[in-house]
Structures are given as C-alpha cells and as structure tokens.
Image (cartoon, grey):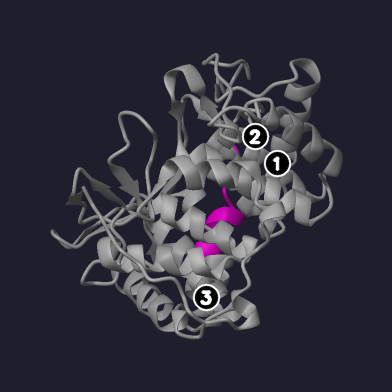
Amino acid sequence: MITCTYTLLGCQDEKYVKSNGRDRLPTQQFIEKHLLTNNLLQTDLTERSKEYLSESIGLWMEFLVEQNDPIQFEKQVQVMEKYFLTKDNTVSWRILNGETSTVNALIDDLRIMQALYNGTEQWEERYKKLADKMATAMIQLNVKDGFLVDYYDVATSSQADFVTMSYIIPKAYDMLYEKDFITKTQYTDNRDLVANAPLSKDGFFPQRYNVTTKSYEYEDEINLIDQYYIGYHRAQWGYEVRTLVALTKEAMASQGVLYGRINPTTKTPTVNYESAAVYALATLMMLELEEKELAQQLYERLLTLRNSDTESDYYGGYIVVDRLYTHFFDNVLALLAERKGKDEGVF
C-alpha cells in the first residue's frame, strides 16, 4: 500500500484562493470522495483499485488548472515526483501493487508537462524547472527518426517504433516548439503526421504511424475514444474533421446514442455499451468546433450515464452502483467536458 503525507500550502496569496464549493461539480466530488486516496488516484473501485496511472495524474492536473485549484495541483505534483518520476525524468505509466513500471507513455508525459507549464503561468514559477526537465527527457529519449514515439523504457533503453495518433497533443507540441525544445523542422514533421493522416476507405483516422516503415496503420474495429481524441486534437490545430462530425450527427439523429466500438464498413456497433469517455471526447471536439447544438445534445446524453440520485453516496459518479463499476478515465474526461462547456456558457 502506498501512503503519503502532505502539508497544505500555507501561502494566502490571492492566487491560492480555491474555487468555491458551489462550483465544485458533482463528478469532482465523487472523484475526491471515492477515487482519491492519500492523494493517489485509483483506476477503479474493484479489480484495479491498487493500480495508479500517470494518465490519471495528467488528466486530473489538467482539470485542476481549469478549476483553478493550486492546492490540489501541488499535491499531484508531489505524488508524481515521489512515485512516478524516473531518474531520467520520464514518468512511469503505472504503479501496480507497489511495482513501478520502467516505461513511460508519451501522451501522459506531454499532458503533465503541459499542465506544469500552465501551472507556472497561473501560480508558481517553480513548476517550470520540472516541466523543462521532462521536456528535455522526452526529446532525448522519446524521439526516433525525428518523431516523438509512444514510449521509452529506462530499464532497457528501448523505444517504440510507432506513434499512436491520439497521443499527439497539439498544445503540448506547440509548447515544445515555442520553448525551443524542438526545431521548426521537428515541429512541422510531427504536426504533419496529424495534418496529413489519410482517412481509411471507410472514412476513419489511422490508429498509429509506424516511423520505421513510414506508414499509417488502421484498426479492423473502430474504438470511438481514439477517433474522437484524434478529432479533438485535429480541431485544436484547425484541421477538418467533417466525416467524424457527420458520423456523430447521423448516429445521434438515428439512434440517439453512440456506442463504444463500431464496424468501420457498416458503421454499426460491435458492442452494446455506451462510454462516458466517448461522449466526453465527442463533446470536447464539438465545443472546439463551436458545434454548440450538437455539443449540448452529446452532453445531455452523457449526463444520463451519471448517477443522478442526490441521496446516493455515489452521486455524481459515472458508475454502475450495484457492481461498483467505474473508471477514473470516464469520470475525469466527463468532468473536463462539463467544465469547458460551463465555462464557455454552452451548458
């Protein structure tokens, strides 16, 4: 069992005024009550309750920046430094039953780095030093043939030879370039992976790019989480996502729902479940595109998956209460979408 003790920040400067209680969304309260233990973020409440992911830290830090909560942000920085940061300044992607992986996940390192730079601008200059160390490590260790690749293993000094398309976070790449960690050529080449990604014959984005074979690779079954991640990131860089918008509109008009996975040719679902993460990412993409009506429709469907019983101990959570089935990823993405929509006055 991992335990840790913290002292609350003593600074009373205005920048440390925590967001007021009225503004703490129900899902935030659910996460803090049930998935945050000793400042460590559990993956779920059942089989993976002793699993802690860098993905969780990065997404939670991203939310805490949006929520303007420097106290909780600082606690996650401490957790990350103490338990996840390797001697080479990469971030272990997982701690499971006390065992720390020697492998990082590019998307998580990028997201944490980005949150630290944003935290620097919003609160504390000292976060910049840590962000700089992480950026330097990524460029030294996660680059292969000029491309930032999925992972680096500090134990074996080995790299991935591919880039998962959803891992390319535009604002983080912009930061790497603006802060002179990558050259203009490197920035352009990596950005072009997204800009030039060809749609499959069925109209879907590729899953990954193999830097060795210099080819895009596609999946036989479409995971809409990946598609909406890519679509959201493309929209942030101003690239078109018309086919994905059209697919979403058609599915919501004809069925009123989006399923987690679909057959690429028939566009019919291959699973019978809905995913909070799918709706959240689709909502974020539509907000980015200013497709406000569709964003509102997706958000309303997202809320049907949330526990709305105010008397329940699990109120606000995206959870199947009788089985305690939930996942941090679903909850935090839903929270990010809700925060963005409310801040922009769409919801």
Q: Position of residue 158 (x, y in %)?
A: 20, 58
Callout 2 secondary element: helix
Magenta residues span: 190-200
Magenta stretch: residue 193 in it? yes
Rendered view: 228 above or below 2: above
Q: Position of residue 101 (x, y in %)?
A: 21, 52
Q: Are dots 1 and 2 in contact, CB under 8 Å?
A: yes
Q: Report the residue marked by disc 2.
A: 279
- Kind of residue at badge 2: Tyr
Distance from disc 3 to disc 1, alpha carbons, whole Å, reads 25 Å
Rendered view: 104 above or below 118: above
| Nearest to the observer: residue 205 or residue 130 | 130
Q: Report the residue marked by disc 1.
A: 283
**How busy is the neighbourhood of tag 2: few (under 14 within 10 Å), some, or many (20 plus)?**
many
Left of 301 or right of it: where is 280?
left
Q: Position of residue 78 (x, y in %)?
A: 36, 68
Q: Position of residue 265 (x, y in %)?
A: 59, 19
